[in-house]
Amino acid sequence: MNTIKSYIEAHKNRFIDELIELLKIPSISADPAYTQDVIDTSTAVKASLEKAGCDHVEICETPGYPIVYGHKHISDDLPTVLVYGHYDVQPPDPLDLWESGPFEPIIKKTDIHPEGAIFARGACDDKGQMYMHVKALELMNETDQLPCNVKFMIEGEEEVGSESLAWFVERNQEKLANDVILISDTGMISNTQPSITTGLRGLSYVEVEVTGPNRDLHSGLYGGAVANPINILAKMIASLHDENNHITIPGFYDKVEELSKEERAEMAKAPFSLEEYKNALDIDAVYGEASYTTNERNSIRPTLDVNGIWGGYTGEGAKTVIASKAYAKISMRLVPNQEWREITELFKTHFENIVPEGATVKVTPHHGGQGYVTPIDSIGYKAASKAYEDTFGKTPIPQRSGGSIPIVSLFEKELKSKTILMGFGLDSDAIHSPNEHFGIFNYLKGIETIPLFYKYFTELSK
Ligand code: BES
Ligand code: MN
Ligand code: MN
């Protein structure tokens, strides 16, 4: 057995126990009730980096939650890898759908994870995947095989838009200087077919409010005679897609990059079973934009989805009422070249244009970010590919993901370096959902693969 494997074998129980401790802290960045827990998590991450062998670790204050920064410098002549991850998590609700407490991690076996998986909010996104890097550093340090310089930057606001991180990166270009950025905050195809994420979608997130009459009304006395904001909002939203499920906002597709036939054919080679996809979700058919496949719809095509909608009476029983207001939260996933602020403006103008007489609409933009694509001929990609080949015995497939990590395009702009997305999660790990989990196999495979990335990246950089 090589030193990487034997170190993991000897320490894996502790690696799992340490992650479980981290998962017990409810670091929910979206909810101010958990402020202290988010801060406590940053302290725990700092301590873990010190223990893993960083020369220097600090908590960097920002206008929002702190960023944990650490480094180990070996030589000015060697390349520097900057590891990014996030220690904040999504809110766990709906709580009643969790089979065990979201912050009471337990290990359970599943069909996909026969070796067991850790169930907890943040297990996969991103505490588990971030902590693989901390343990990989410990491993390289303890076995004297850290081949280059390393920097860590772990933030606490990724799930709410990374505003403070953008602030931090703009002010610390020199401190963060690096040759490649390494992130594990995405997924791979399956435990027998690794893949490397080569693209992320951008995002524009808006909230809309439709107002009708100045107060809630009796739906018998007034019904039929005034604009009902909920009816109006439903109609407006429905009109945002046409019969082919194309988005109807004027200009929305203007900058969308169309992939060539060859590129689409290459994409279609990735293993995918539509039957299994439907079965896993209990749906009898997939749905989406005409003339694109499921894998295209969820990666290279932009989308518009309502994420929440409310208004009127939603309590027990029935109440006859026409509400004064109706609301929705809407996300648009964007593809490279679409500029998220421009798309937000196009949405706002269009939505304000289509509101009928008798109602008014207010559009409030939330956060957003640019999409990202990375080439597969870079040293970073090649190093990652070789690392997976060694540990999985298979060449990883490059694949564009539908998710967003908006800060990645900012890294490229501010730090002028490429990001390599070495994800070890699976789509079935239920990130952002009840019963989120992360396979023990995946966690340990990550710890095994990461040191090989460092090795090959350093070798290929010479
Ligand atoms: N780690 C995810 C993004 C992700 C997951 C990308 C799986 C690719 C595969 C990240 O934490 C996330 O949830 N991002 C948000 C955007 C953010 C601005 C809130 C998202 O994609 O909804
Ligand atoms: Mn994440
Ligand atoms: Mn997330």
Image (cartoon, helix red, strand yellow):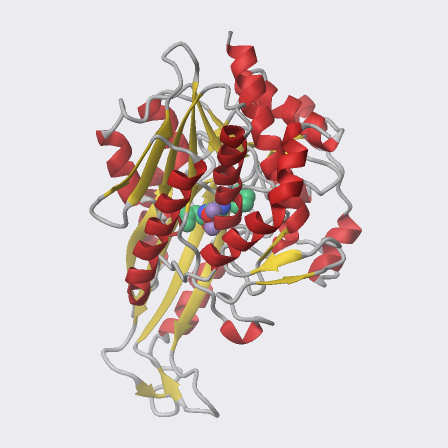
- Residue 139 screen position, x and y as percent: 54, 34
Outermost residue, top side:
462
The residue closer to the viewer here, 109 or 427, is 109
Task: Confirm whether residue 435 shows in the render.
Answer: yes
- Residue 320 screen position, x and y as percent: 41, 90
Relative height, residue 181 to residue 100 (above, below): above
Which residue is located at x 31 percent, y 65 percent?
A: 209
307 horizontally vs 28: left or right:
right
- Residue 298 screen position, x and y as percent: 59, 44
Dividing the picture into quarters, in which one does residue 364 lie?
A: bottom left
Which residue is located at x 29 percent, y 61 percent?
A: 36
Check the picture and name the quadrant holding the N terminus: top right
Dividing the picture into quarters, in which one does residue 191 lie?
A: top right
276 horizontally vs 422: left or right:
right
The residue closer to the viewer here, 20 or 329, is 20
Dividing the picture into quarters, in which one does residue 195 lie?
A: top right
Task: Confirm whether residue 288 shows in the render.
Answer: no
- Residue 363 screen position, x and y as percent: 30, 56
The residue closer to the viewer here, 269 or 157, is 157
The residue closer to the viewer here, 329 or 433, is 433
Which residue is located at x 25 percent, y 36 percent?
A: 168
Relative height, residue 152 to residue 122 (above, below): above
